[in-house]
């Protein structure tokens, strides 16, 4: 049984733009020193919007589209505005051991393995973010700075995927609930491998941690083969997610358009795209919750 995912949309009103730009961030600020303190001067309008967005992310939708009219705003204005809004509802966390808090998702030649997907034009590759970090981000946020043709970001609910996987063979779900080695790509000091399950059952459904390449490389680092049962389970999971992607929620991240989602619950990837006269430029932020900000 397939579940059609509907992503609600929210617009940051033009009347709130100046307030969200009140905390200025110098254009040459290093990516690892953007201010992580909660932005609290945006007023009741933005506070209420943040509450609605978080309710949607942690509710049935699992994610939201956020829009701001980009006319009259520079790339840095859009980045600053979205950064300040994000810090009002979530605490930003570094995305790599090098400390980047806001990360350019752009095609680069010779991208490192830690950013093999975000710095490429690869399609598919459905995954969750931050599996190589000490703590899995609660929320992920991508927003566009360029005109976009193709490369829509796709979101799928892990609970719907598990339901389909169970129909194929419940043993696949059991297999994915056992801890497996993830290669953390030198992102945790003194640690090469982190053992964690792909699926974790909670009171609210399943949590997901999945980057197949990191799992396969984890087994390679341990010099052990991937167990046949796990291999079959990942093959089945990939087949289910690839099939679900045909009807998944798809968001084109044009300039000023953002997508925020529950990173513990949602699987994501993207459709193919080609760069011609301009580059596809996005920015990414990770956040955790529970420090007194809106949640």
Image (cartoon, rainbow, N blue to C red):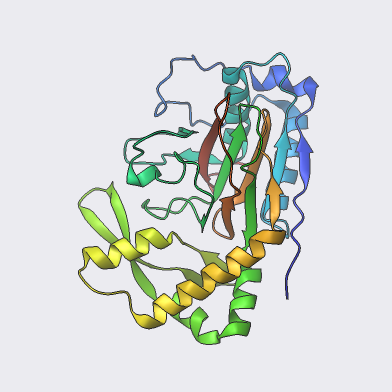
Closer-to-camera residue (63/113): 113
Classify residue 204 by image quadrant: bottom right
Q: Which residue is drawn at 25% across and 65% down?
A: 220
Q: Residue at x 75, y 38 (%)?
A: 49
Q: Name above or below for residue 28 compared with residue 230.
A: above
- Specify whether 31 is left or right of 247: left
Q: How many numbered dots are placed on residues in this image?
A: 0
Classify residue 16 by image quadrant: top right
Q: Where is residue 50 in the image (x, y as percent from the top left)?
A: 70, 39
For the question of whether residue 205 can be seen, the reply is no
Closer-to-camera residue (97/89): 97
Q: Position of residue 203 (x, y in %)?
A: 60, 72
- Specify whether 91 is left or right of 180: right
Q: Where is residue 243 in the image (x, y as percent from the top left)?
A: 64, 67
- Specify whether 199 is left or right of 144: left
Q: Residue at x 48, y 82 (%)?
A: 174
Closer-to-camera residue (47/160): 160
Q: Position of residue 248 (x, y in %)?
A: 69, 58
Q: Quadrant of the N terminus?
A: bottom right
- Specify whether 16 is left or right of 262: right
Most extreme residue toward the front, as rendered?
Answer: 276
For the question of whether residue 277 can be seen, the reply is yes
């Amino acid at each position: 049984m397939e579940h059609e995912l509907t992503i609600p949309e929210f617009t940051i009103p033009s009347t709130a733009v100046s307030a969200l730009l009140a905390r200025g961030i110098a254009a040459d600020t290093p990516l690892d020193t953007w201010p992580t303190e909660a932005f609290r001067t945006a007023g009741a309008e933005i506070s209420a919007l943040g509450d609605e967005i978080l309710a949607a992310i942690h509710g049935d939708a699992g994610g939201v589209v956020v829009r701001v009219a980009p006319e009259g705003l520079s790339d840095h204005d859009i980045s600053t505005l979205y950064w300040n809004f994000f810090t009002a509802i979530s605490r930003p966390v570094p995305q790599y051991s090098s400390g980047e808090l806001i990360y350019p998702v752009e095609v680069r030649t010779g991208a490192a393995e830690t950013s093999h997907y975000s710095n490429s034009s690869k399609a598919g590759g459905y995954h969750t973010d931050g599996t190589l970090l000490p703590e899995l981000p609660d929320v992920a946020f991508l927003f566009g700075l360029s005109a976009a043709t193709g490369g829509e970001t796709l979101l799928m609910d892990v609970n719907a995927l598990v339901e389909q996987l169970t129909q194929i063979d419940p043993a696949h779900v059991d297999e994915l609930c056992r801890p497996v080695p993830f290669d953390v790509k030198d992102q945790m000091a003194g640690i090469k491998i982190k053992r964690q399950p792909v699926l974790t059952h909670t009171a609210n459904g399943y949590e997901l941690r999945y980057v197949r390449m990191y799992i396969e490389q984890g087994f390679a680092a341990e010099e052990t083969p991937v167990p046949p049962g796990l291999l079959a389970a990942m093959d089945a999971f990939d087949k289910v997610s690839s099939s679900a992607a045909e009807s998944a929620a798809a968001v084109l991240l044009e300039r000023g358009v953002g997508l925020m989602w529950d990173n513990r619950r949602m699987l994501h990837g993207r459709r193919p795209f080609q760069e011609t006269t301009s580059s596809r430029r996005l920015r990414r932020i990770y956040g955790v919750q529970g420090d007194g900000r809106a949640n």
